[in-house]
Image: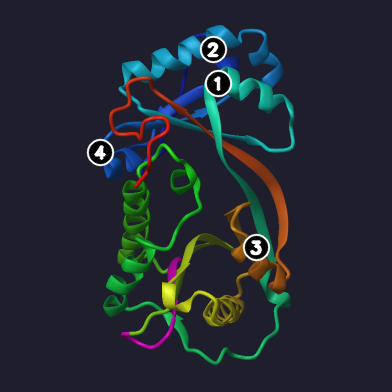
Amino acid sequence: MADIAPEPIEAGRPEWGSAFVLPWDTDIFGFPVGTYTPGEPATLERDLETVGERLRAWAAARRVELISCTVPADDRAWRHVMPVLGFTCVEQTLGLTFRIQTYQAEAPSRPVRLATVDDHPQIEEIAGHTFRHGRYSADPRFPMDLADRRYRHWVRNACASTNPADRVYVVGPPGSVKGFFQLRIVEDRAEVGIMGLSESAKGTPAAFDLMTGMHLDLKALGTRWLTAKISAGNTRVINLVSHFGYRFRDAQATFHWYADDAPHLVPVGGSAR
C-alpha cells in the first residue's frame, strides 16, 4: 500500500496539525473515517476555537463521520485540549516489549503451529466475535458489527499473505483451532497485530500455550524483540503478558470526534448492537 501524505487542516498553519482519510477502514465500513495528528497542545490552546472550526470543515469537505486522534496519556494538557476540539476519549493503550532471546520454556502441551489454509475459516470466525477492546469496539457510538468486520478483514488479509514475514500462529490441531496470534517480522523485531481465543478456550491454558509456542518459534528464527500495543482495559491479556515478563511503556489515549450528521454511527444514548 502506498504511503499516504497527511494534509494540514489549514494551509499555511502546519502547527494546527494534519489529517487524512483512512482508505482501508473507509473501504471496510462503507463511509469515510479519518485520523488527526495535532500540533503541540500549548500551540493549539492559543487558537482552539479556530482549530476546531477548521477540523470540522476538513471533515465536512470529505464527508468524514469519525476522526480518531491518539495523544500521550500522561500529558494533562491534552485532557483540556481534546474535549474543546470536540473529541471524546474512547480508549487508553499501553505499548509492550518483550526480549525473546532470553526466553526459556518447555514446548507447550497443546500443539502450536503456523496456520494453514484449512484453518482460515476458524480464525476468521474467532476474530469476528472475540474482541471487545480496541478503539472501534470500545466506542459506544460505533456499530459493533462494523468493528467485528474490521477484525475479520484484518486476519483474512494476514492469512492470505504470501510474505514470509507475515505469520499467523494457531493453537490446537487442524479442525479444532482454539486461538490465533498474528504478527509481522520486521528485521529483528516481531510486531504483533492481534490475537484471539475462541469462547470455549477462554479461561483455559490455551492462551498460555499459544504464546509459549510462538515465543519459542520466534526465538529459533533469531528474532530479538516483540512489540505490541494493548488496550489498558484488557486486564485478561495484561495479566497474561505480565506472567511472561513483558514490559509496559508509551501510555496513550485515543479520542474520537463525530460529525453532527453521521448516519452510520449510533446516536447518543443509543446501543451499538
Image location (x, y in percent) of residue 15: 60, 16
Q: Mark 1 is on which residue type? A: Gly
Q: N-terminal of the two: label 2 or label 4?
A: 4
Distance in Å between CA atoms under marks 1 and 3? 33 Å
The answer to whether marks 1 and 2 mark residues whose Cβ atoms lie closer than 8 Å is yes
Q: Does 120 sit above or below residue 129? A: below
Residue beneath label 2, please? 51
Label 3 Cα neighbours within 10 Å, binned few <14 / some 14-19 / many ≥20? some
Q: Nearer the viewer, residue 128 or 109?
A: 128
Q: Does 208 sit above or below residue 245? A: below
Q: Nearer the viewer, residue 109 or 141?
A: 141
Q: N-terminal of the two: label 1 or label 2?
A: 1
Asked where in the image residue 120 lies, by quadrant, the reply is: bottom left
Residue beneath label 3, please? 238
Give the structural element (helix, strand or loop) at label 3: helix
The answer to whether marks 4 and 3 mark residues whose Cβ atoms lie closer than 8 Å is no
Asked where in the image residue 80 lies, by quadrant, the reply is: top right
- Number of numbered discs present? 4
Q: N-terminal of the two: label 1 or label 3?
A: 1
Q: Mark 2 is on which residue type? A: Val
Asked where in the image residue 63 lies, by quadrant, the reply is: top left
Q: Nearer the viewer, residue 156 or 13?
A: 156
Residue beneath label 1, please? 17
Distance in Å between CA atoms under marks 2 and 4? 27 Å
Tag in front: 1 or 3:
3
Label 4 Cα neighbours within 10 Å, binned few <14 / some 14-19 / many ≥20? few
Image location (x, y in percent) of residue 175: 31, 85
Residue beneath label 4, please? 30
Which residues are the magenta region? 165-175
Q: N-terminal of the two: label 1 or label 4?
A: 1
